[in-house]
Amino acid sequence: MGIQERKEREKERRRQQIMVAAKRVFSSKGFNKATMEDIAREAELSPGTLYLYFMNKDELYASLSLRILHYLKIRLEHVVQEKGLTPEQRITALQSALYDVYEFDPLILINMFHLQSSETLSNLSAELSTEIQRLSRSALRNIVKIFKDGIAQDAFIDEHPVAMADITWSLFSGVVLWETSKKLLNPKNDYLKTTLETAFKILRRGVRKSV
Amino acid sequence: MGIQERKEREKERRRQQIMVAAKRVFSSKGFNKATMEDIAREAELSPGTLYLYFMNKDELYASLSLRILHYLKIRLEHVVQEKGLTPEQRITALQSALYDVYEFDPLILINMFHLQSSETLSNLSAELSTEIQRLSRSALRNIVKIFKDGIAQDAFIDEHPVAMADITWSLFSGVVLWETSKKLLNPKNDYLKTTLETAFKILRRGVRKSV
Amino acid sequence: MGIQERKEREKERRRQQIMVAAKRVFSSKGFNKATMEDIAREAELSPGTLYLYFMNKDELYASLSLRILHYLKIRLEHVVQEKGLTPEQRITALQSALYDVYEFDPLILINMFHLQSSETLSNLSAELSTEIQRLSRSALRNIVKIFKDGIAQDAFIDEHPVAMADITWSLFSGVVLWETSKKLLNPKNDYLKTTLETAFKILRRGVRKSV
Amino acid sequence: MGIQERKEREKERRRQQIMVAAKRVFSSKGFNKATMEDIAREAELSPGTLYLYFMNKDELYASLSLRILHYLKIRLEHVVQEKGLTPEQRITALQSALYDVYEFDPLILINMFHLQSSETLSNLSAELSTEIQRLSRSALRNIVKIFKDGIAQDAFIDEHPVAMADITWSLFSGVVLWETSKKLLNPKNDYLKTTLETAFKILRRGVRKSV
DNA sequence: GATGAATGAGTATTCATTCAT
DNA sequence: TATGAATGAATACTCATTCAT
């Protein structure tokens, strides 16, 4: 391992350390109320150091989304590559993958949904912004593939598969947002998992080609 | 018309004037970047005057959500009261009502979805917060009714109708958020309406009781 | 009674109404935290009306001092005019008069002490400012007289009587301020009356010409 | 000197720098009209920096009182510890100590008297508020001791020594307030020192046990 | 006279970011 | 690299005062 590479690794480790701290702080205080000093304290670093690894607060925030998008990408690739599944089984696998993504980092996922249509995108470096879009697209493409295959195998109705992927993703994020908000107001309300199951059950029935 | 009533009306007109201005400013700048002074300027009033009609920035913001929730409530009541519709037709009517709500005020609707799982709820006056919840619940109850009736008439599968209502609402908000965010990144992407149609088509098929 | 005079009286009555309200509000909130609207509400008038009777907040505040200074003036005149008192008895009568002034309006008296060396004097109308000084001087002159007489009758030591009057007034206001502040911190501490008695006892002994 | 200690010193120096500036500004403009920006400018610092050393405006203000109370405490300890003084000489030493305190910082002392019965106490940190009370009490206790000793030595009349200490302190603060306010109105009036001397002369005579 | 809605100048405080060490 | 003290721009909110009715 060259010295260059070692440095690279060390730098990456630091980035991770900061992101872990940022995740905790953003999750508990929300983006606006979380201060850079909060994050620095949580990471046991000084505020100045954060700026050696991230251009600004927005970019630090966005990098968290990146992390979960990475995980999403990988999980969806697995779903598509899994062998021997019927199209409907593959949707079930997709559902399960999405739920894993939710569990990987529930609060960041929700923040990410916020980020998507928000005021923050303009502050990001072009690089980061591109990367986020690349990952999102890759994820969506894999979902599209599931529907395409289903249609090709005459298992699914012949709707536009891109739209069907969008709908699936919308359904997932909508349920997560809505159930989370209900739970915020009333912590006893924890039906996310069963609601998600019912949602996908309806989805599967809705796209299934009846004979 | 008594003098009391006239004043009441005048006051309500002022509130509307401010809300219209606030809507424009919040829509174009987002909540955080919009300043009270921006809104005052847009409303051709002084900053102080805003505080005669709204306790603080959060409350002004939330009152915009209230307005659209009122509209939602009324629209959904109509859907439920409409005579002579089959359960599936009623879902179609629901879809169309929801789309109207979206058109009534697209940006505020989206902001409201954001608001739901956000940091802002604590600053609201108890009164306003209660009102928001009351309207949301009333809206949901009407959607539940559609599914209950459908099940009672043996037209829909026998899933928990509350969950089905949640899913419908999630589907709607998810599609609106997702399509809007795609459109933000690429303004040519305007598939919201058709995506929503496909989504509800799948939904109707998904809940339909096959013979 | 001419119409002019009736108007004059009506106006004076209104001023009193406002001053009573102002006294309550200033006493409970202090000068800075009391708003003109608070006072208007307490007086069951509109804010604008206050400005028909008082030039501004400072002047309204100062007029309260005026009221207590009037009372002080009258009380001290009585002390000096009372017949057949020895010089020491007259100091006792003075003490009792001052205590009455304190009771006439405890909080305003304290506020008045504040006013005297404060930032507020410049805003007052020349008229009001002059009046306040006129009354203060008249009060002090009467105290001076007591000491002058005592010296003339060879009952008091031959110190500068103006200084002795200043000291008496200082002693009174100092005790009131100090005991009040102690009572603020610990409401059970209510020794003002007895402390004042001891103070004047010492004063009498201090100025008495020993044989 | 450790690095820790050096930092501590540097920090204390900064606090002093700010307090010196604050004193100037508060003295010339009064509490309400002095802005934090004024003070920052006077201290040649930015407004934000002030908040690194003081929680808020009230606390900065109160810290000035603290400074003079420290001085008072030390001066009174000396008076009590001084050897070989008769009780009356000790009162004279007390008078001279109090006058030193006045000269140490005339305007802040006066502000402190104002503060005592004012609206400001609630905003202070518990810590600061406690410290102020602790110092005040310590000061008073030493004055009490002088009178107790005088009584014990049969030099002073047998009045309650706590009351006598309160009266002494009241006399001092009353004279300072009153003479200062007279001087404000008429700058030629500068009799504070002689009035204070007369006041203490009367006090000494008043508490002296005549044979 | 009386009103009270509207004004708008005024300010304490926060916090992302920088930069000398 | 890392620090953390210093920065200073930015802003929600208040309230004495005015003036059209």
Image: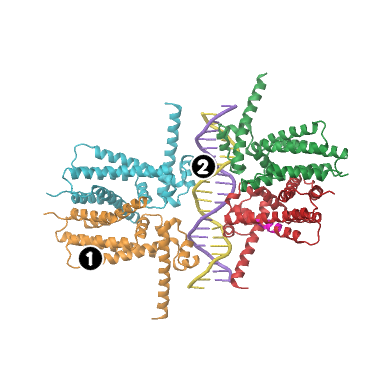
Chain colours: A orange, B cyan, C green, D red, E purple, F yellow
Protein chain holding label 1: A
| Residue D15 magenta-highlighted | no
- Image position, residue D61 (x, y; %): 63, 53
- Image position, residue B111 (x, y; %): 37, 49
The kind of residue tagged 2 is Gly
Neighbour tally class for label 1: few under 14, some 14-19, many 20 plus, Cα within 10 Å: some
Asked if disc 1 and disc 2 are in contact, CB closer than 8 Å, the reply is no
Disc 1, SS: helix
Seen in the image, is A130 located left or right of residue B145? Answer: right
**Visible residue check, residue A130:** no
* Above or below, C171 relative to D18: above
**Visible residue check, residue B163:** yes
> Does label 2 lie on the same chain as label 1?
no
> What is the number of the mark on residue B48?
2
The kind of residue tagged 1 is Val
Protein chain holding label 2: B
Seen in the image, is A176 located left or right of residue C204? Answer: left
Neighbour tally class for label 2: few under 14, some 14-19, many 20 plus, Cα within 10 Å: few
Along the line of sight, the residue nearer the viewer: B86 or B186 = B86
Identified at 85% across, 44% down, the residue is C159
Residue for badge 1: A80
- Image position, residue B164 (x, y; %): 24, 49
Question: Could you tell me how far apart the alpha carbons at marks 1 and 2 are, in whole angstroms?
Answer: 59 Å
Identified at 68% across, 58% down, the residue is D70
Q: Which residues are magenta?
A: D66-72
Q: Which quadrant would residue B70 be assigned to in this image?
A: top left
Seen in the image, is A204 located left or right of residue C46? Answer: left
Disc 2, SS: helix
- Image position, residue B64 (x, y; %): 39, 44
Along the line of sight, the residue nearer the viewer: D131 or B30 = D131
* Above or below, A210 relative to E7: below
